[in-house]
Image (tube, rainbow, N blue to C red):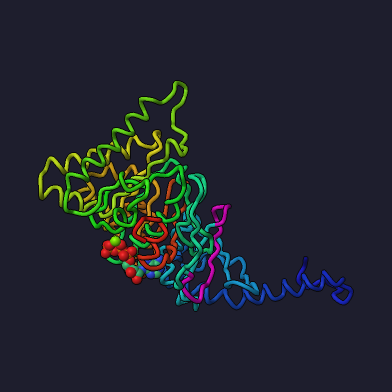
Amino acid sequence: MSLFPARRRWLSGPQRGAYRREVHAQADRQRWRPVWHAAAEGSGLSRDVAVAAGITTIVPELVSVGRPTVGPTALVVRLLPGQLAADVRAVADRLAPALGAVQLRVTGLSDGVHVRIELLDRDPLAEAFRPMLPAVATITDPLILGLADDGVVVSHALADATHLAVQGMNGSGKSRFCYGLLSQCAHAPDVLVAGSDITGLLLGGPWAGTRHREHQAAGTGDLEQHAASLERLVELMDQRLADMPRGVDKIAPSSDVPLVLVVAEEWPGLLRAAQARDRKLADRITSAMLRLASEGRKAAFRVLVLAQRFEAAAVGGGYLREQLGLTISFRVPTESLVMLHGDDARELGAAHRTAEPGIAVVSAPGRPLARMRAPWFGEYRDYCAAVGGDDW
Ligand SMILES: Nc1ncnc2c1ncn2[C@@H]1O[C@H](COP(=O)(O)OP(=O)(O)OP(=O)(O)O)[C@@H](O)[C@H]1O
Ligand SMILES: [Mg+2]
């Protein structure tokens, strides 16, 4: 519709509404254009181009300004040739104050040339996420992993043939996250929570008297039991693979043949402790874990490895890290973030190095990189009560 129709007086009601909206939209664009231009130029999104009159500076064009009644103001801009949404995300920290926002949420539109920039007045992950965490009934039910900064709940079903990696510095929220995760799957009859935990907090004690406990090794008193327990799991995996009926390439878990979730809490700590005792012991533990991770998917095994950082030297080689598809990083240095999530994560590095406990970056093949807030599960005794061991 033309902005100034010749016979404005005779516009119908809906036409008048559309006319008014267009006038407001144009006024918004007018008002935002110099602000956007200065912000984009100052943040390095501009280019100098030669024109007849000399050199001029261009920035991605501001196409529209949306001001919904609910939700943040959103700018849509058209990228310059060769620019990506990632280029805008990379300078989001510089753009935000220039646009009067605390934080930006940048989304590339499906046409590949436009980007939506939402101006947030606070970090959407600033507040604790305290959902109900119901116990799942089976491996196809989604486990709640967290709340992404676009307000979508991030979930994962163990039926997906993916192993998990969780990293984070001291006190960043790894264990709490796992309290939430394990308590959700503790009562599914087709899941067995097995593995090794030198801290004896995540596995071990809380699970006393449950069907899971005999498949877990906990504490540092007897490191041999960690190797033996992981080797028993490898035997079970081999048995399942050997018994696999003809014409079947993967096992369908059931309560008789449950999916085995092999948890390795403080994995580098276990390897270091074993190495200090006896190199052969460390080799046994490493090779059992590598076999579970590389061959276990078909035999309904999933591994969940926790480490402060996933440096190859600390986790027994880069090969293990490459097997872990669903990756979650709590507060870590930028290099560790990039190591687990790829180069796209670099732009989040500066902010994530000092992230609050419980704030994580999550990614998986086919799942775009996202920031999320892990659920707040409650206190340790709540976890112990939720997994249903005898002592609680
Ligand atoms: N999702 C969360 N929301 C809010 N606060 C959290 C969350 N997760 C953890 N915290 C806070 O961070 C503290 C440390 O969490 P946690 O013990 O899980 O860290 P960790 O990464 O396992 O540390 P460590 O490496 O020392 O084992 C918790 O006691 C709690 O105060
Ligand atoms: Mg911990």
Which residue is pictured at 50% across the width and 76% down the height? 121
The C terminus sits in image quarter: bottom left
Residue 102, percent from left and from top: 46, 76
Answer left or right for 330 relative to 55.
left
Residue 257, percent from left and from top: 42, 36
Ligand 1's image quarter is bottom left
The span shown in magenta is 109-124
**Is 113 in the magenta?**
yes
Residue 156, percent from left and from top: 47, 50
**Is 309 in the magenta?**
no
Answer left or right for 87 relative to 4.
left
Q: Residue furthest right?
A: 10
| 341 w.r.t. 99: above or below | above
Answer left or right for 328 relative to 169.
right
Residue 70, percent from left and from top: 63, 73
Which residue is pictured at 62% across the width and 76% down the height? 30
Q: Can residue 307 be seen in this view?
A: yes
Q: Is residue 331 visible?
A: no
